[in-house]
Image (tube, grey):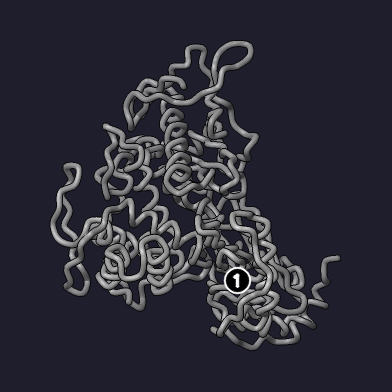
Amino acid sequence: MTPTLSSRRARVAGAVAIVAALAGATVPAATASAAPGMREAAISQARANVTHNAGVFGFGTDQALVVKDVVLDADGASHVRFDRTFQGLPVVGGDLVVHQDAKGRLKDSSRAAAHDAAVKSTVPKVTPQSGAAGALAAAPGVKDAVSTPELVVWAADGTPRLAWRTTVEGSGEHGEPAGRVVVTDATTGEQIEAYDAEHQAAGTGNSEYTGRITIDTTAKSGGGYTLTDPVRGHITKDANNASSTALKASSGTPFTSTTNVWGDGKKFSTDRSTAAVDAHANTAWTYDYYKNVHGRSGIKNDGKGATVFVHVGTKWDNAQWSDSCFCMMTGDGDGTTDPEQVDLDTMGHEMTHGVTSATANLRYSGESGGLNESTSDIFGTMVEWYANNAVDTGDYLFSDQSTPPWLRRFDKPSLDGRSADCWSSGVGKLDVHYSSGVGNHWFYLASEGSGSKTVNGVTYNSPTCNGSTVAGIGNAKVAKIWYRALTVYMTSTTTYKGARTASLNAARDLYGAGSTEYNAVAAAWSGVNVS
């Protein structure tokens, strides 16, 4: 039975010790063991380790753990990620990762940034409408807005309390997905924070961005072909310029062909399947990158393919991933200077938002929001390098094909006039697309090093923020380190300082403490003022 609001009021003070007392402690070894390589055994042992070490995890009465992800190492060690609930309410900022050795013994833990605090034991009567009203007011540019309020225990900022987390979804000026998540204190109605709800972001195909390519399609029983990938499971559809609010996985029109030849290869093409070629191929490259490089089978690591929509909205000059419909949405560009938003790194970027959501779930606000965006830039770029396409070669210029000359760059992010090169105490106050510059700059320094360098015909010149000289170890190694940091060590409230720790832990796991790789990661972080 779901607890009533009044019963939640009476016991919400218990959330203090339960969801927020996550201080460090010496961790005793658990007595039970998990069979190496077995997911369910690892989950069972992780639950036992949390229960046996309740004081370390702040785990107690009325709490429950919800499995989100499991990473199994080759040596039998495991890393089990949990979300937490209290009285059936999601605890925002209460997520944790249980790190276990091959015998199932508790080695360490990663925890979101909740701290001891006081919660008022009496909460005035509140209704979902009180949260919705504030949310709608905080999203004035969203058309046809629909609000969905949810009562949560909010602990992301270190002060656990009841709050309304209200998601406002609708469409923007050009029919693109638009929305805000607004968090309001259930006691006072005061807004705690607000952030964007959406993340901006074998036939023969004549693509717009990658030349003439081979794509995987499916033959129809009655003849002809559809843009359904039988290997990876995704399907590419025409949204028919419908607004994002009208789209769900079953929406749109599947692309079909009698010849299995698709598109005309032109920019601003009148052949609607041209954009679909890029979208279909780039989704496949993204899937293959994660599977072949990181061992991840699909966005949610469950082997399932997504729905991909092209021609969303009217003159919508962007692309977005949507968790709610498990789909990728791409617009047609502005119709004059920017063509369809279906280039390699852009699509890899947007689908990476789905990977982040399924793992660390970095909050789209403050420094964690910058890390969320940077993660998408990093892996979107790595998809481009992985594809090794002769037309769209690997570079450190994000979205240089659909937004020439580039939307963001890694060697010196501030060249766009807005992004941060270096960490400072105020970087978390920037828009997440600009605070991401710190992470992007770190990735470049760790990959290629500081100073001037020409890569694939593009000249870069990357200074450090502390005047040091950094030697790179190659982007393949850095990406492996970052993926492990994201999926094993980061949590929803990880900051740049926390990302340094997470990536050093990952470098230690992969290459050894004190290795060249470990030292390069540390030097690159120091090079962007993160210590």
Q: Count the numbered circles shown.
A: 1
Task: Using the rendered image of the protein, determine whether residue 140 is visible from the camera's viewpoint.
Answer: no
Q: Quadrant of the N terminus?
A: bottom right
- Image height check: is 223 above or below 519? above
The furthest residue to the right: 1
Q: Is residue 382 visible?
A: yes
- Circle 1 packing at 10 Å, graded few (<14), some (14-19), many (20+), is many
User: What residue do we see at 27% from left, 38% from top?
Assistant: 393
Residue 209 horizontal side relative to residue 357, left or right:
left
Query: Callout 1, which amino acid?
Result: Arg
Up/down of 205 relative to 443, above or below: above
Judged from the image, the secondary structure of the residue bearing numbered disc 1 is loop
Residue under circle 1? 105
> Residue 475's spot in the image, x, y percent?
30, 52
| 456 over 3 or under it: above or below | above
The residue drawn where x is 51% and y is 59% is: 75
Q: Is residue 357 left or right of residue 500?
A: right
Quarter-wise, where is residue 331 in the image?
Answer: top left
Residue 305 place in picture, x, y as percent: 57, 38
Which residue appears at 56% of the width and 62% of the height? 78
Farthest residue in the left direction? 452
Residue 212 placement: quadrant = top left
Q: Position of residue 142 (x, y in %)?
A: 55, 53
Is 148 or 154 nearer to us in this picture?
A: 154
Measured as percent of width and height from the top left, residue 19 is found at 65, 78
Q: Quarter of the image containing the C terminus?
A: bottom left
Q: Is residue 390 above or below residue 484?
A: above
